Image (cartoon, helix red, strand yellow):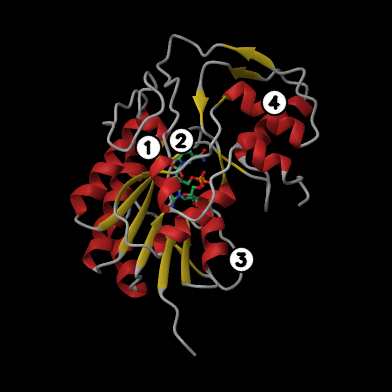
Amino acid sequence: MMTKPRMLVTGGSGYLGGWVARLARDGWDVTATYLAHAVGEPDVDWRHLDVWDEAAVVTLVDEVRPQVVIHTAALNPGQGRDFDAVNAAGARHVARASASVGARLIHLSSDVLFDGRKGHYVEEDPPSPITPYGRSKARGEEAVRDSGAEAVIVRTSLVYGWRPSVARAAQWMIDDLRAGKPVHLFTDEVRCPIWVESLAAAVVELAGMSYTGILHVAGAQALSRYEFGVRLLRFHGVDPSPVIPVPSPKDIPRPLNCTLDCSRARALLRTPLPGVDEVLAAHSPSS
Ligand SMILES: NC(=O)c1ccc[n+]([C@@H]2O[C@H](COP(=O)([O-])OP(=O)(O)OC[C@H]3O[C@@H](n4cnc5c(N)ncnc54)[C@H](OP(=O)(O)O)[C@@H]3O)[C@@H](O)[C@H]2O)c1
């Protein structure tokens, strides 16, 4: 029997990391990590890892000796405040350890490392973060570049999906509306939301390629958070009419137009990157 190449997925217990592990396990020998949420998904070697702990990262990478590391572990907005410890220092530890064993690294970054004034950002646009989360993701990218690892930095946008569970992007709205709470959605924050299964497939495809550098990987359709939310609610059979469309608050800096130009990814990848309407029209929440 042919041995499969080894892949290490950090944040395998997360939404994207879970899909990467699921899609990769046929072709790769997958080790995936969790921090607080242990996972029982089969055909994956599950390990506990805190990426802030450099010694633990080095020990795991030395033991697994992966050909490819997919670094999805991150602290996302709403999950705490210690963004730098996870998204900058953690990325540095993972990138250095990957470089030390000659592993190819696919690092997940974000559209909100841009200030959102320009929109339609290309890979060459310099990061201009205006939020603590955005700054930590920009520092994470610097750490990856400084590590000397053979790396791809995948900048992506709002992630949505409904399998194996409904993504955060929709779940909080459904919960709040069902509880009779008001839901306000911004009309002036524009993103290119991506279906988690497209993004994971693109990441797994990239794992087996030789491309290095930055790559913008997001959905084909630019939508405001309001337009996006209304579509997700309808898809899940929830009446969106109580949702209140509002402009974003002006007292805290928020990036407005973080749309990504993904033409490089479209030319490079076989994986399609459809927009929200196309994805939702082709599926149902039970499919
Ligand atoms: N979700 C979005 O809309 C979005 C948008 C743009 C970019 N991204 C980027 O895409 C990537 C994946 O996002 P996601 O939405 O799939 O994330 P997620 O569902 O929130 O999962 C985060 C993962 O990171 C793990 N984690 C958190 N802190 C950790 C630490 N200190 N050490 C090790 N693992 C840790 C979590 O483990 P436990 O759950 O076991 O604690 C979980 O597996 C991230 O890099 C994110 O910044 C996401």
**Which of the labelled discs sits on residue 230, or is there none?**
4
Would you say the residues marked 4 and 1 are in contact, meaning their CB atoms lie under 8 Å apart? no
Q: For the residues carrying marks 2 and 3, which lies nearer the camera in this image?
A: 3
Q: Position of residue 112 (x, y in %)?
A: 40, 30
The residues tagged by marks 3 and 4 sit, at their Cα atoms, a distance apart of 34 Å
Q: Residue at x 29, y 26 (%)?
A: 128
Would you say the residues marked 2 and 3 are in contact, meaning their CB atoms lie under 8 Å apart? no
Relative to 203, residue 220 above or below: above
Q: Which residue is mark 1?
A: 83
The residues tagged by marks 1 and 3 sit, at their Cα atoms, a distance apart of 27 Å
Pointer 3 or 4: first along the chain: 3
232 or 95, nearer to the observer:
232
Secondary structure at badge 1 equals helix
**Which of the labelled discs sits on residue 74, or is there none?**
none
The residues tagged by marks 2 and 1 sit, at their Cα atoms, a distance apart of 7 Å
**Amino acid under label 2?**
Gly
The residues tagged by marks 4 and 1 sit, at their Cα atoms, a distance apart of 29 Å
**Is ligand 1 within 8 Å of the beta carbon of the residue shown at mark 4?**
no
Relative to 238, residue 208 above or below: below
**Amino acid under label 4?**
Val
Secondary structure at badge 4 equals helix
Q: How many marks?
A: 4
Pointer 4 or 1: first along the chain: 1
**Which of the labelled discs sits on residue 80, or is there none?**
2
Q: Which residue is mark 3?
A: 40
Q: Residue furthest bottom?
A: 1
